[in-house]
Amino acid sequence: MAMGQRNSSGTGSHLVERLSNGNSPSEHLPKPRSVVINVATDFSDTPAGRFDVEGPFSGERFRQSLLVPALRDYDEVIVDLNGVEGFGSSFLEEAFGGLVRLHLFSKEDLAQKLKFLTDDPSLEVEIQEYISRAAKVA
């Protein structure tokens, strides 16, 4: 189909665009608004460690495999911290502080995009402290 030509379904609800640079048209569609990442069910109910070499459920792996893609693809990322047996400080600092420390996102970006669901408000305070500390040294 040529640029702007309607699809063959006849509904007229979808336009197909062929981009001259070869990129997929989906790269130019609006992002979905929000997503929920449930740490316990989407990752592990026993997350631990800072780096991948410390085990398969490290903060580094959580950041790389779930947080970064979600933050890039969605306007709002809600992280559900409930249902986990506990969080070590190294996991939380690497997962969340690492977003800023590694210059992947700014503290301001995260304040706009990253939200938390938790029965323990001190967890969110702790995570925000790691983000703030990372911003001071980044």
Image (cartoon, rainbow, N blue to C red):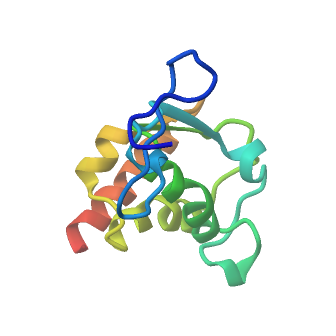
**Residue 86 placement, left or right of 79:** right
Find the residue positioned furthest to the bottom. Answer: 53
How many numbered marks appear? 0
Camera-side residue of 54 and 41: 41
Residue at 70% across, 84% down: 53
**Residue 42 placement, left or right of 93:** right
Residue 53 versus residue 27 in the image, above or below: below
Coordinates of residue 113 in the picture (x, y in percent): 37, 40
Coordinates of residue 92 in the picture (x, y in percent): 53, 59
Q: Quadrant of residue 90?
A: bottom right
Q: Quadrant of the C terminus?
A: bottom left
**Residue 48 placement, left or right of 116:** right
Residue at 34% across, 48% down: 110
Camera-side residue of 17 and 138: 17
Residue at 31% across, 67% down: 134
Coordinates of residue 114 in the picture (x, y in percent): 41, 42
Residue 23 versus residue 13 in the image, above or below: below
Residue at 77% across, 55% down: 46
Find the residue positioned furthest to the top. Answer: 11
Q: Quadrant of residue 4?
A: top left
Camera-side residue of 123 and 27: 27
